[in-house]
Image (spheres, grey):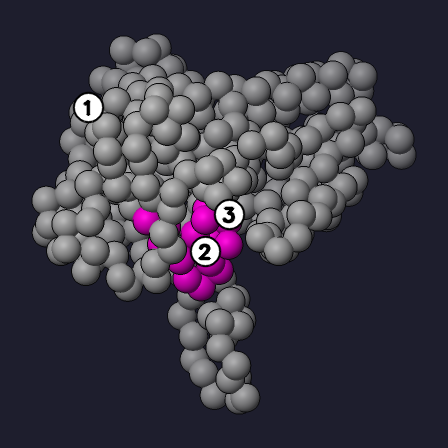
Amino acid sequence: MNLETISFKNNTLKILDQTFLPNRQEFVVLSQLDEVINAIRTLKVRGAPAIGIVAAYGLYVHARNLQKRNALSLQALQEAGDLLKAARPTAVNLAWAVDRLLKAVSGQNDSSAILQILRDEAIAVHEEDKAMCDSIGEHGSKLVGQRSNILTHCNTGFLATGGIGTALGVVYKAFQQGKQIHVFTDETRPVGQGARLTYWELQQNGIPATLITDNMAGFLMKQKKVDLIITGADRIAANGDTANKIGTYSLAVLAKHHGIPFYVAAPSSTFDLSLESGEAIPIEQRPADEILNCWQFENRERYRVYNPAFDVTDHELIHGIITELGIIEHPNKEKIINFYQTFNKGDLL
Ligand code: MRU
């Protein structure tokens, strides 16, 4: 797929507005901090790595605006960073990217140097994510049999990352390798990332897919129609507990019951080793309208709605975490720390 879902050319940040998909491909330019924050909050751009990339470019765009008004300072950048990070609380890639840029400019007081560093760092966040997706795809594709029915949840592909994706990156690589792949795409209520985005992406790339409602997954497993389940992640705690789109936990429980391998695919920017376990991961609560919009209710005010955007899957339910550095099988705290020590990822530990 040659669609640039996040582009940054001539200092202009442009994104494909995902809220119009699959019906229309509309791009929107984000030239102000509040536009970037709004785009993240309203899911014009979504998916953990993608929001980190857009936040990084957004901080640079904001820094340029500040400089034009002679108002660029580290304090002003810090404040902007806090606002960006608050846009969506669960996916750690957002805070990770913002903090990475702020750290890169700490101690600098020359505005041209600050701008140059922010720009370079934002581009690096984007480029590195592309490369991480490719490596995740390579490692994960080894788990995929020659003929495979893969079930996935939410959207984890081109739209959600800077490259080919994480869980969908595995699908794309395996398909490229000539494997016969078919993907069951969970609808992913209430926002429909599976129905609107994943199904569309797979179609664009010629990969056979079948759309199912979320509550059909268990029956499919029972009917032995699913060989492998791969999802993405929004934040992985030090012990491997993983926050991902609401509904992921149910899939993992069902997978265990049916003896189906359940894998999570994520770059190292999705790990938050400062958190002992998934219990400490903040879960974003989304507006009631996201659920009510699924229906043509006449009296919306009658409904009390609970709408957590994510759930947490216990590490014991996860067969492995596919990262750009390799696969952490049956993850737990010791294995994750050893894994990152082996690869010298001191920034994570
Ligand atoms: O609310 P969303 O659409 O941002 O949720 C996205 C997910 O849960 C994805 O699975 C996750 O961010 C990984 S994307 C590579």
Q: Nearer the viewer, residue 299 or 225?
A: 225
Q: Of label 2 and label 1, which has the lower sequence position?
A: 2
In the image, the segment drawn in magenta is: 184-200
Left or right, 293 with reference to 209: right
Rounded to the nearest whole Å, what is the CA distance between mark 3 and mark 2?
A: 8 Å
* Residue 75 in the image, given as x and y percentages of width and height: 70, 33
Rounded to the nearest whole Å, what is the CA distance between mark 2 and mark 1?
A: 35 Å
* Residue 264 in the image, given as x and y percentages of width and height: 30, 36
Residue type marked 1: Lys
Q: Of label 3 and label 2, which has the lower sequence position?
A: 2
Q: Which mark is residue 200?
A: 3
Label 3 CB sits under 8 Å from any ligand 1 atom = no
Q: Nearer the viewer, residue 216 or 88?
A: 216
Quadrant location of residue 126?
A: top right
Q: Which mark is residue 335?
A: 1
Q: Secondary structure at mark 1?
A: helix
**Residue at position x 21%, y 46% in the image:** 226
Q: Which mark is residue 195?
A: 2
